[in-house]
Amino acid sequence: MSILVTGASGTIGSLVVQGLAAAGAQVRAFVRKPGKQSFPAGVAEAVGDLTDVASLRAALSSVRTLFLLNAVTPDEVTQALVALNLARDAGVERIVYLSVIHADRYTNVPHFTGRRMVAGMSSDSSMRNDLTIQQVIRDHGVYPMPIGSAGVAMVDTRDIADVAVAELLRRDAAPAPLPRLTLDLVGPEALTDATAATTWATALGREVIHGVTDLAAFEQQLASFGPAWLAYDMRLMMAGIQKIGMRGDAGAVDQLQAILGRPLRTYAAFVSEAVKAG
């Protein structure tokens, strides 16, 4: 019996595959295109799509545990529900699902409400998302994410993957299905636009300003290089972040650090690493 990882060629999925393989687990990586990702020796590649029932059925055969990660798409609820139902049909009773935090509060954000329907494991904003804005910070000295001052506990994607690996291994090794558990995947501190900008300024050794709050302009910028529906979805999410923030429940950090057996990676360490890497 093996562990099936969906989204296996993506940032988090590929890290989960690597972590499981390093732990000696039997892993099957579900990918859209064969050969796109270089996986560790012994990892079996299953080619298909979450909307391709036949390919997903084949991938789920002889699988005991499923890591379900699906992208933000217009049909992500359909994808997730199809995958969960097919997993049930295949007898898979151990499932770790990567959802979003505060889905109960961000009820007007399409991809939050969708994931709330199938949520089994919650995650927060990923530090690695800030790699995509590094060039803007370097070129213009501006932290461009309109996160405001309510506080966002950004978490490094490597920590997300490591927690997922630990939970997948725990459930896969259990003699019977374990009780449901929801984890808030958060970083060790709550950041604001001001503290994020200061962190980048310290690492770069020059001024970085903040204060971007125009969500209409934010949406327009995203829509210039991506789907309009996704740009609007992100605008709604940022409006929620500015109003209520994104923080884990009390004890979330201690719970995650107990699972990992080490401290969570800090935002300052992430930024320093990114700057050194160029």
Image: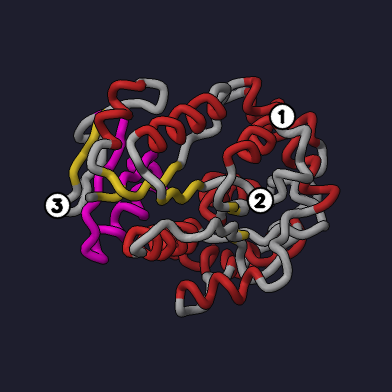
- Disc 2 crowd rating (10 Å Cα; few below 14, some 14-19, many 20+) is many
Residue designated by label 1: 219
How far, Cα to Cα, is label 3 from label 1? 43 Å
For the point 80% across and 40% down, the residue is 239
Residue 101, numbered label: 2
Q: Amino acid at mark 2?
A: Ile
The residue range painted magenta reads 4-33
Residue 62, percent across and down?
23, 42
Occupied quadrant, residue 209: bottom right
Q: Looking at the image, is mark 1 or mark 2 nearer the viewer?
A: 2
The colour scheme of the drawn protein is: secondary structure
Q: In the image shown, does 3 or 101 lie closer to the viewer?
A: 3
Residue furthest to the front: 176
How far, Cα to Cα, is label 1 from label 2? 22 Å
Residue 222, percent across and down?
64, 30
Query: Does dot 3 land on a helix, a strand or a loop?
Result: loop
For the point 35% across and 26% down, the residue is 49
- Disc 3 crowd rating (10 Å Cα; few below 14, some 14-19, many 20+) is few
- Disc 1 crowd rating (10 Å Cα; few below 14, some 14-19, many 20+) is many
Which of pointers 1 and 2 lies earlier in the amino acid sequence? 2
For the point 62% across and 27% down, the residue is 230
Query: Does dot 1 land on a helix, a strand or a loop?
Result: helix
Q: Amino acid at mark 1?
A: Glu
Q: Looking at the image, is mark 3 or mark 1 nearer the viewer?
A: 3
Q: Are marks 3 and 1 in contact (CB under 8 Å)?
A: no
Residue 174, percent across and down?
36, 64
Quarter of the rendering occupied by the C terminus = bottom left
Query: Does dot 2 land on a helix, a strand or a loop?
Result: loop
Residue designated by label 3: 42
Q: In the image shown, does 50 or 140 lie closer to the viewer?
A: 50
